[in-house]
Image (spheres, helix red, strand yellow):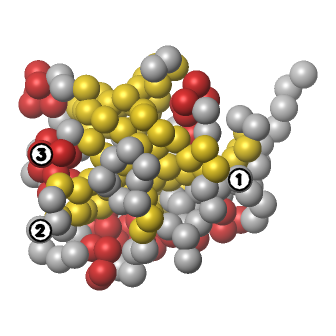
Amino acid sequence: MTTPRQAVPLTKAYLLLNHGPVTLVSSAHGAQRNVMAASWAMPLDFSPPKVAVVVDRHTLTRTLMEQSGEFALNIPARSQASQVLAVGSHSGRDQDKFEQFSLSTAPGAHVAAPLLDGCVAWLECKILPEPTNQDRYDLFLAEVVAAWADPAVFSEGRWHFPSDDRHTIHYAAGGHFFATGEGFDVV
């Protein structure tokens, strides 16, 4: 089943990442695709929207990103924590992680990288080549060309988590996660 997706205006795309959730970086080139977990992803600019993400040079995801010039950032929910840990702990060079961990996907609108079902938000990204940053720091900068969110969880520029299993998550270490806490307003 495909998770409902509603377009998020690109000027608001940064709101999907600015609270620091774990992301799943998906990539594809030709017939090959992969997904990995990444905690070091952040919004970088508003217009055009940009992101920064660190992707180790030894990963298949990085190889596919460099070959295709694009990727997707998928923002998983608490209900997906075991899948996040699994794809972050295994190499796509050894197995098809989508098949191995029962990950269903939908196609992106602007990139070949698959969008993972069950997530609460998705950012489709085109790499802005910065060879020095990529080689020296494993740091990729990208323009967000499409942004989506599950309207039950994110709408009108705000996160509102309808249930505990739909909260975004933050990875600490050793299989330990935190769930995004309860929001509040200051007036």
Figure check: 67 above or below 140: below
* Residue ID for mark 2: 93
Secondary structure of the residue carrying tag 2 is loop
Mark toward the start of the polypeptide (2 vs 1): 2
Q: Is residue 139 visible?
A: yes
* Residue ID for mark 3: 67
Verify CB contact (< 8 Å) between mark 2 and mark 1. Answer: no
Mark toward the start of the polypeptide (2 vs 3): 3
Figure check: 134 above or below 87: above
Local crowd size for mark 1, using a 10 Å CA cut-off: few (<14), some (14–19), many (≥20): some
What is the spatial separation of the Cα atoms under label 2 and label 3, in whole angstroms? 15 Å
* Three-letter residue code for mark 2: Arg
Indicate which disc residue 40 carries: none
Percent position of residue 20, x then y: 51, 40
* Residue ID for mark 1: 151
Percent position of residue 12, x then y: 61, 29
- Residue 120 sits in quarter: bottom right
Picture residue at 11% right of the left edge, 68% below the top: 93
Image quadrant for the N terminus? bottom right
Image quadrant for the C terminus? top right
Figure check: 114 above or below 139: below
* Three-letter residue code for mark 1: Pro
Verify CB contact (< 8 Å) between mark 3 and mark 1. Answer: no
Mark toward the start of the polypeptide (3 vs 1): 3
Side (left or right) of 102 relative to 183? left
Instruction: Depth check: give the residue in front, 7 or 66.
Output: 7
Secondary structure of the residue carrying tag 3 is helix
* Three-letter residue code for mark 3: Gln
Q: Is residue 23 visible?
A: no
Verify CB contact (< 8 Å) between mark 2 and mark 3. Answer: no
